[in-house]
């Protein structure tokens, strides 16, 4: 990747925001935060305007690395630049807070959502279910289903599998069995087939 970038430079091809997004994404996924930071500094120095994609990449990378301070700083910066967070942004925040065992911070994300017009999708809610399940916040996890209904989002197989896994890992076999029964009866009613857990 770096050799290709160097070839472009030698050939006099100017990098675009997409080029930098690719570099940031690759360095972030490789856990090379030093090089990722160098790209960020270069973009700032030469006045490349960040897009929603750029912010999503770096917020996710720092979230996965457990650097919540940097992640939150970038989220604030994004909003100060009037770039509207997307479902991808919010998933990254929720995932990071779940991994860091900070349920109160997930509550902060939900309060932000209440005061915004971000369109949420099933992927976001699945991320929320997963985070609450990992934290052992089972009442909150179950409450996500109500949130989905209020937002006109339907749970999918991933939603139920994630809940089932969380209950099973915690030894809550009765809850897992009840959930499976509910899903199976709903599947039989609507589609005439059972889900494959």
Image: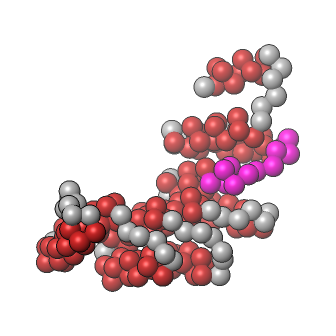
Q: In the figure, residue 26 lies in which quadrant?
A: top right
In the image, 158: left or right of 185?
right
Question: Which residue is found at the position 71% from the left and 21% from the top?
Answer: 6
Instruction: Report if residue 157 lies within the magenta region.
Output: no
- Does any portion of residue 38 appear in the rendered image? no
Residue 11 position, x and y percent, is 80, 16
Q: Is residue 49 above or below residue 74?
A: above
**Along the line of sight, the residue nearer the viewer: 177 or 185:** 185
Question: Which residue is found at the position 38% from the left and 68% from the top?
Answer: 155
Q: In the figure, residue 177 lies in which quadrant?
A: bottom left
Instruction: Report if residue 52 lies within the magenta region.
Output: yes
* Magenta-drawn segment: 45-56
Q: Quadrant of the N terminus?
A: top right
Q: Is residue 169 above or below residue 172?
A: above
Residue 152 position, x and y percent, is 49, 75
**Along the line of sight, the residue nearer the viewer: 177 or 99:** 177
Question: Which residue is found at the position 51% from the left and 38% from the top?
Answer: 30
Q: Quadrant of the C terminus?
A: bottom left
- Does any portion of residue 99 appear in the rendered image? yes
């Amino acid at each position: 990747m770096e050799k290709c970038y160097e070839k472009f430079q030698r050939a006099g091809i100017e990098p675009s925001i997409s080029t930098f997004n690719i570099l940031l994404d690759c360095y972030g996924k490789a856990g090379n935060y030093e090089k990722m930071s160098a790209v960020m500094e270069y973009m700032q120095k030469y006045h490349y305007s960040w897009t929603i994609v750029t912010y999503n990449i770096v917020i996710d990378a720092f979230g996965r690395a457990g650097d919540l301070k940097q992640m939150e700083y970038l989220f604030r910066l994004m909003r100060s630049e009037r770039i509207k967070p997307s479902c991808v942004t919010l998933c990254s925040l929720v995932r990071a807070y779940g991994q860091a065992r900070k349920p109160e911070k997930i509550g902060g994300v939900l309060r932000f959502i209440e005061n915004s017009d971000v369109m949420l999708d099933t992927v976001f809610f699945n991320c929320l279910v997963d985070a609450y399940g990992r934290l052992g916040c089972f009442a909150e996890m179950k409450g996500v289903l109500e949130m989905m209904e209020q937002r006109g989002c339907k749970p999918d197989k991933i939603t139920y599998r994630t809940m089932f896994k969380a209950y099973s890992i915690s030894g809550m076999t009765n809850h897992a069995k009840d959930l499976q029964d509910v899903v199976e009866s709903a599947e039989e009613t609507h589609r005439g087939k059972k889900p494959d857990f």
